[in-house]
Image (cartoon, helix red, strand yellow):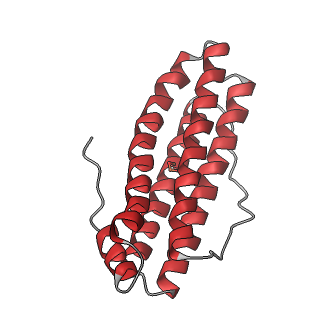
Amino acid sequence: SLSEEIETALNEQIKREAHSSAIYLAMGSWCDRHGFDNSATFFYKQSDEERSHMLRIFKYVTDLGGHALSPEVTNIQQEYDSFRAVFEQALEQEIAITQSINRIVGKCHQVQDYTTVTFLQWFLKEQIEEEYIARRALELFEVIGEEGVGQYMIDKQIAKLSYDG
Ligand code: OFO
């Protein structure tokens, strides 16, 4: 069973994943509206993944007899300053999620909840991948540059990003 403290922390993480999912949807919309179709597809896929992360935690909480709370998602940023700004925020978002999972793992150690530590290993591994992809995406802005057809080329390359670590 889950301690109250860990249950609360996991419910907060459920909320963060739901928030991530909603933010990626907004990022997808921004890209769609500005003609960056591959990036839009990329963010819609990310949005789905975040929802699956949310569900994974949600089910874990209920499996252990806890009360998983359906998250209220508010404060979604709908507008972005530029194509690049979207990806900068995506990376920031992933870094924040990694830190948050790490903090929960720290808490689990304090209360000796090694079951949840084991459960969260998957997320830490997943975050390596997500941060890697977000960094690679941002690097495209440096490598290709945004002049002329640059943004078009960047959008093309976004479709090819993958992680095989
Ligand atoms: Fe849920 O992993 Fe990204 O944010």
Residue lying at 66% horizontally and 33% vertically, measured from the top left: 66
Closer to us: 81 or 11? 81
76 lies left or right of 162 = right
Q: Quadrant of residue 62?
A: top right
The quadrant in which the C terminus is found is: top left
Q: Residue at x 30, y 60 (%)?
A: 161
Judged left or right of residue 41, residue 92 is: right
Q: Nearer the viewer, residue 63 or 95?
A: 95
From this view, report whether residue 87 is shown above or below residue 97: below
**Percent coordinates x, y for residue 118 in the rendering:** 47, 23
In this view of the protein, can residue 133 be seen by the observer?
Answer: yes
Relative height, residue 165 to residue 24 (above, below): above
Q: Is residue 101 above or below residue 53?
A: above
> Where is residue 52 drawn, in percent x and y?
47, 52
For the image, the number of numbered tags is 0
Q: Residue at x 60, y 64 (%)?
A: 23
Q: Residue at x 30, y 76 (%)?
A: 156
In percent of width and height, residue 58 lies at: 58, 43
Q: Quadrant of residue 68?
A: top right
Give 21 or 84, whichever is nearer the viewer. Answer: 84
Q: Determine the image quadrant of residue 122.
A: top left
Q: Is residue 1 visible?
A: no
Instruction: Answer left or right for 40 relative to 22.
Output: left
Q: Is residue 142 above or below residue 101?
A: below
Residue 130 horizontal/vertical position (percent) = 43, 49
**Quarter of the figure that contains the N terminus:** top right
